Amino acid sequence: MERESMQYDVVVVGGGPSGLAAAIRLKQLAAKAGRELSVCVIEKGSEVGAHILSGAVFEPRSLDELIPDWQSKGAPLDTPAKEDRFLFLTAGRAIGMPTPRVLHNAGNYIISLGNLCRWLGQQAEAAGVEIYAGFAGAEVLYDEAGRVKGVATGNMGVGKDGKPTENFTPGVELHGRYTLFAEGCRGSLTKTLVERFGLRDGVDPQTYGIGIKELWEIDPAKHRPGLITHSVGWPLDRGTYGGSFLYHFDKNLVSVGFVIGLDYRNPHLSPFDEFQRFKTHPAIRPVFEGGRRIAYGARAINEGGFQSIPKLVFPGGALIGCAAGLVNVPKIKGSHTAMKSGMLAAEAVMAALGRGEGAELDDYPDRLEASWIWPELKAVRNVRPAFHWGLWAGLAYSGLSLFLLRGREPWTLHHKPDHASLLPAKSTPEIAYPKPDGAISFDKPSSVYLSNTNHAENQPVHLVLRDPTVAIRVNLEIYDAPEQRYCPAGVYEIVEAAGAGPRLQINAQNCVHCKTCDIKDPTQNINWVVPEGGGGPNYSNM
Ligand SMILES: Cc1cc2nc3c(=O)[nH]c(=O)nc-3n(C[C@H](O)[C@H](O)[C@H](O)COP(=O)(O)OP(=O)(O)OC[C@H]3O[C@@H](n4cnc5c(N)ncnc54)[C@H](O)[C@@H]3O)c2cc1C
Ligand code: SF4
């Protein structure tokens, strides 16, 4: 069936901070130049913000530049950061440590990034941007010369068997003179662009962490709006990178989460269970006693930093935000750089339009290099890779690099791809996780329930195994099926039918779109593709 097409000047794929900042800036620049400019944003979540999961401590620098009067326009930045704490945890103790300078948050705000995106979406629409939520970019479109000419949204109403049902509606082609990819960390279309245009040639592999988060309403007597606590150490072993965040924001709410580097080596490790165990620490448990868990979710975060930034432009478009991997890892912040990169790409689009039809966005990387993003990311480039030597060496090196050398080392440390780091299950210790108590720690099904995840039942599985036999032959036999543990939503299960041997069951309807399986599968056999638009988690206040 023929797909309808719609023509825009700029198509933005992804309604997160980067995509929305790009769209708003485009409209601002067009208004200033007195010209018409059509901009659309597509978002795979059921609404803008539905798939956004972040900490979040927000550095308002880019927002100040984009919408200087955000305060009077009601931006949801209501809890100024008041106090930073940094803890080293052992099984029984919490030892206060000096907070690294990069984690000083004076001037920042504790927010729900999802709510900020909802507000940015309103600002974008007020400026004339067309936003289509519930539409996932499923395919990149190219013209005869191989230039990106837009994206197609996925077909709706395709059955489990891949055949059209009576509700079939073909996807729509969105053609743009320029297409900006703002899919965030490990974007599924971005991945195909990286491959097709060799965007990672000559740079380090991108590396990642998995962030698992809960939102709690706690006893008002224990609530300290503006308090920001980070921890390292227990329950992780010294060779595994990771730590917790705990942010008190408004209305007695606390965001608590745990990030674990996906370069971990022990296939028995379960990031979900490490997080649950963390909350039972004697210094942490009291915060949540008497409280109520109200939301749950998970999302991968880029950790490659400066040396992993790919080539950012290709014929017809550019990568922005976490699709480009612009997270400042020791700061644990990427929304300010995401927004700024979107704004810079918008400026490059306007400049290219001025140069005539078909001009490329070649000066976007130059603009990025000339902006504050570049020195900020360059200065911290060696911190994350130093943790490949373990926690103590990593902390010692980061202290030296951040406090003394300030990133001026004449060398750059490098990364290896996360999927290559697992050791065979036989050579690593098993980990016995305590049973959840149902008060502070929980199991996966009750957690996924709180993510409000919903996928139409009758649709093709969006977690595609390149070779289905690998799931048993390699994953189970060598690594004891690690996807059963690293998936924070219980999507993957090894089941045994009598006499039929083990097989991998994929409960795709539970997927919270964190992208961890696409990253961590040891042979890269799992390919995450977009499900039917609108499917996935429905996060509020995350
Ligand atoms: C656990 C955790 C804690 C964090 N804490 C902080 C913090 O405290 N402070 C901070 O500044 N940063 C933090 N970050 C990082 C921050 O969230 C990201 O840097 C930021 O969200 C990146 O913005 P983005 O627009 O590039 O991508 P995203 O925010 O990921 O947005 C991408 C959007 O695109 C949509 N999308 C993806 N693919 C498609 C498609 N094919 N079609 C249509 N739509 C699509 C997604 O649904 C999503 O809405 C944290 C991240 C995590 C995971
Ligand atoms: S299936 Fe993959 S993307 Fe979905 S929740 Fe599990 S690990 Fe994350």
Image: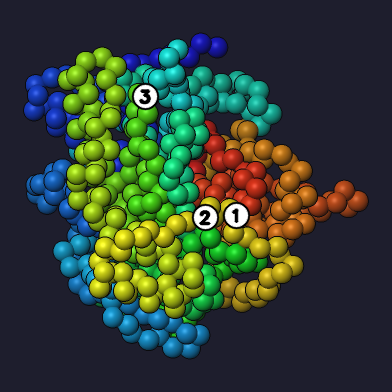
Asked if labels 2 and 3 touch by Cβ distance under 8 angstroms, the answer is no
Q: CA distance from mark 3 to mark 2?
A: 28 Å
Percent x, y for residue 59?
A: 22, 57
N-term-proximal mark, 3 vs 2: 3
As drawn, the label of residue 315 is 3
Q: Residue shown at 77%/43% (left/top)? A: 469
Quadrant in the picture for residue 150 = top left
From the image, tell me which residue sits under label 1: 420
Asked if labels 1 and 2 touch by Cβ distance under 8 angstroms, the answer is yes
N-term-proximal mark, 3 vs 1: 3
Q: Residue shown at 65%/26% (left/top)? A: 162
* Residue 445 in sight here: no
Percent x, y for residue 47?
A: 37, 39
From the image, tell me which residue sits under label 2: 416
* Residue 349 in sight here: yes
Q: Quadrant of the C terminus?
A: bottom left
Pointer 2: residues within 10 angstroms few (<14), some, or many (20+)?
Answer: some
As drawn, the label of residue 205 is none
Task: Identify the residue at the far right of this view.
Answer: 499
Please, what secondary structure does the residue beneath circle 1 have? helix
Drawn side of residue 492 relative to residue 306, left or right: right
Percent x, y for residue 3?
A: 48, 14
Q: Residue shown at 62%/66% (left/top)? A: 266
- Tell me if residue 173 comes above or below residue 58 in the rendering: above
Residue type of the residue flagged with mark 1? Ala
Q: Residue shown at 44%/78% (left/top)? A: 392
Residue type of the residue flagged with mark 3? Pro
Residue type of the residue flagged with mark 2? Lys
- Tell me if residue 74 comes above or below residue 1 in the rendering: below
Pointer 3: residues within 10 angstroms few (<14), some, or many (20+)?
Answer: some
Drawn side of residue 286 relative to residue 390, left or right: left
- Tell me if residue 91 comes above or below residue 473 in the rendering: below
